[in-house]
Image: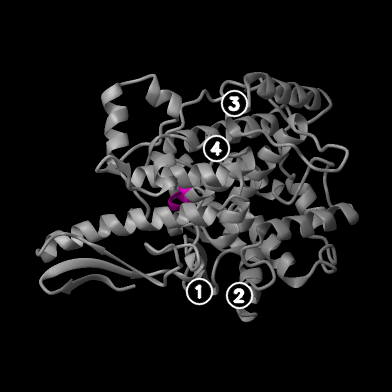
Amino acid sequence: MLGVVNDRGRYYWVKRVPKRFLGLVCGVDGQPVGQVRQALHTDSLKEAKAKGSQVEAARLAEWEALAVGDDASARAHYEAARTLAEVRGYSYTPMPGLTDGDFDRLMHRVLSLSGDGVLKSPLSDAKAVLGAVPEALPTLPEVLEEYFDLTKTRHIKKSDAQRHRWSLPRERAVNNFLAVTSPNNSRGVRNLKPVNEITRPDALKFRRWWSDRVEGGMKIESANKDFGHLAEIFGTWADLKNAEMPNPFLKLRLEGRDERTRPAFSKEWIQGKLLAPDALTRLNDEARDVFLITLNTGCRPSEITDAPVEDFQVEVDIPFLRIAPHGRELKVAHTRRDVPLLGVSLNAAKRIVARGGIQKYGNKAGSWSACVNKFMTTNGLKETPAHSAYSVRHYVENALLAAKVDDRVRADILGHKYHRPSYGDGGALEGRRAALSLIAF
């Protein structure tokens, strides 16, 4: 990269040809060159720098179009043409739209390519500016990849594990839709439509597939999540890409409500089963201690597994677990809080600190849940088949309510939304400890 250089009082744009374009970029004699030079027709450095940036963008776009080659996909050719048209100051418009429209606009484009009555621009430029490359839009999996790239700034505060968990349901929604509307052929290859060919009947076919599954026992919520993800992916991509096409995934929601909710453990079950001697001894130490912390705090598993060791404040006057971002995104802002540690939860936190913090399940709350739920099933520790490790959180919520703990204090303990002063106001750790002492094991 050389940039703008001065030669005998006049400025030129000079650039070494990047390795990936070597052999493709040729000089006036038709032979490949390793360096290009273009006059900027100015003796002003400021003007030369401005022109140089424009020339570089145009040249790189030309070279990218050359690199696409004859064997590339129609999609790659189309995207290269769009970019090339844009760097020359035009939006890509298919040729029929130019020839059927404003004649002056068409002539302006033609004249920009010519000089002295002949074509002066490369053929790739002419095809791009005059809309001669057939339109080719991405498939839905390609849209998904572009959507992830277009929205990456939304997730700056997420940890790698959180970004992975966020992307999974969106990938699943796309895969579910394609399994229904674009099944594999006899060779095991899926024939994918360009996104502009996905129709409302395709979306309704997917809706019927989900409706049948809901009748068979699947949750309505699962269906509606798929519909919502697809509508948001398609809509966001179309808006940011300025692609004018109807969103086939809007207004697909199934009506009705799931009757099944996570039940809470009873106090008797926790005392008689979960805290019975040797009940949890065969569970690995870290999984057991995380579980015991949930019993007296109601914390979400991820709030414990993702906490660094310094957030387990076990040697202060009122021991507590601090729930804070630390390189990850909290579920919502009001989940940031300090939760007092008492009884079996405090003892478990001390063991975690002694081991140097969470190791096995750090940023892996899903793995922790799978391990504990399997252990509970295998060892008869579920009060009903519908119970899970998360049922402990519901127990804590119900127990605080039964103990007539103030709404504000309950919200502060559990991280629920509550119209109150911002985090840190009031110094309410003592009040939270007093509330939890009413229900602690």
As rendered, which of 217 and 105 lies closer to the eye?
A: 105
213 relative to 102 in the view: left or right: right
Residue for badge 1: 310
Mark pair 3, 2: CA separation: 45 Å
- Identify whether 307 is placed above or below 148: below
> What is the CA distance from the residue labelled 1 to the residue labelled 4?
39 Å
Disc 3 designates what residue? 249
Determine the secondary structure under disc 1.
Answer: helix
In the image, residue 133 above or below residue 57: above
Q: Is residue 403 left or right of residue 35?
A: right
Q: Which residue is mark 2?
A: 357
Q: Amino acid at mark 3?
A: Phe
Helix, strand or loop for disc 2: loop
Badge 4 local density, few (<14 within 10 Å), some, or many (20+)? many
Q: Nearer the viewer, mark 1 or mark 4?
A: 4
Residue stretch rendered in magenta on the structure: 150-155
Q: Amino acid at mark 1?
A: Glu
Look at the picture and state if 174 lies above or below 325: above
Q: Nearer the viewer, mark 4 or mark 2?
A: 4
* Quadrant in the rendering for residue 101: top left
Q: Are marks 1 and 4 in contact (CB under 8 Å)?
A: no
**Label 2 is placed on what type of residue?**
Gly
Residue 248: which numbered mark, if any? none
Amino acid at pointer 4: Ile
Q: Nearer the viewer, residue 289 or 127?
A: 127
